[in-house]
Amino acid sequence: MSPPEKYIPALSYDRLTPLFDPLLRWSLRELELKRRLIVQAQIESGQRVLDLGCGTATLTILIKQTHPAAEVFGLDGDCKILGIAEAKVAKADVTIALDHGLAYELPYPDRSFDRVVSSLVIHHLTTENKRRAFNEIYRVLRPGGELHVLDFGRPHNLYTSIVSPLIRRLEEAADNVQGLLPEMMREAGFDQVEVTRRFTTIFGTLALYRAWRPA
């Protein structure tokens, strides 16, 4: 039997999980960028939306508040962080299904969702698991469905080029910094794959990605 794959929790260490929300708010203009992700996704009434790697459900709650007629799901592999998410969902008084599972082994039937969104999750995955995750996302999207991702990307200015060697060592971010995510999405079958926007942060370039499952 092969050994279990290492799961990387938020901020890499389980004991740092309580710091997850404050750090994102302080360092990465979290709400601004997640709102841009929601705008890009163009979610419509009645659509089923999966927030992949939902963490503490900040993005998941924003989606439901912005699109109350959508059916919203959040999935994460960290039980402790899902407990924080459940408390936040209850406090926000919104209806969201929170599920435990891994990005590369999604616990959903084929063609279950119209949109899959993900924020700062893909860089946690090994190269192989990134590919597996994109294959799984393709599987659970309906034909014509869309994937929208906010995550690290290829450096796009002098500052982000300077800090990129450090970002390459952050968990499994080397694929992101090398600009490999769009090609991985195409390999999974996605079409019209593009980087729609890049942002400068203290940690380097964050990029918005968009990909479409052909109808």
Image (spheres, rainbow, N blue to C red):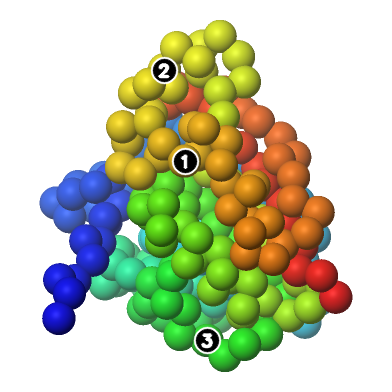
Spot the residue most to the top: 158
Does the rendering let one see residue 65? no
Q: Nearer the viewer, mark 3 or mark 1?
A: 1
The image shows residue 1, relative to residue 144, as above or below, that is: below
Q: Secondary structure at mark 1?
A: helix
What is the spatial separation of the Cα atoms under label 2 and label 3, in whole angstroms?
38 Å
- In the picture of the structure, the residue carrying the numbered disc 1 is 175
Residue 140 location in percent, x, y?
61, 80
Residue closer to the observer: 30 or 118: 118
Q: Secondary structure at mark 3?
A: loop
Q: Secondary structure at mark 2?
A: helix
Which quadrant of the rendered structure holds the N terminus?
bottom left
Residue 16 location in percent, x, y?
19, 47
Q: Are marks 2 and 3 in contact (CB under 8 Å)?
A: no
Give whichever of discs 2 and 3 has the lower sequence position: 3
- In the picture of the structure, the residue carrying the numbered disc 2 is 163
Q: Amino acid at mark 3?
A: Tyr
Q: Determine the residue positioned at 18% across, 49% down.
A: 13
Q: Nearer the viewer, mark 2 or mark 1?
A: 1
- In the picture of the structure, the residue carrying the numbered disc 3 is 108
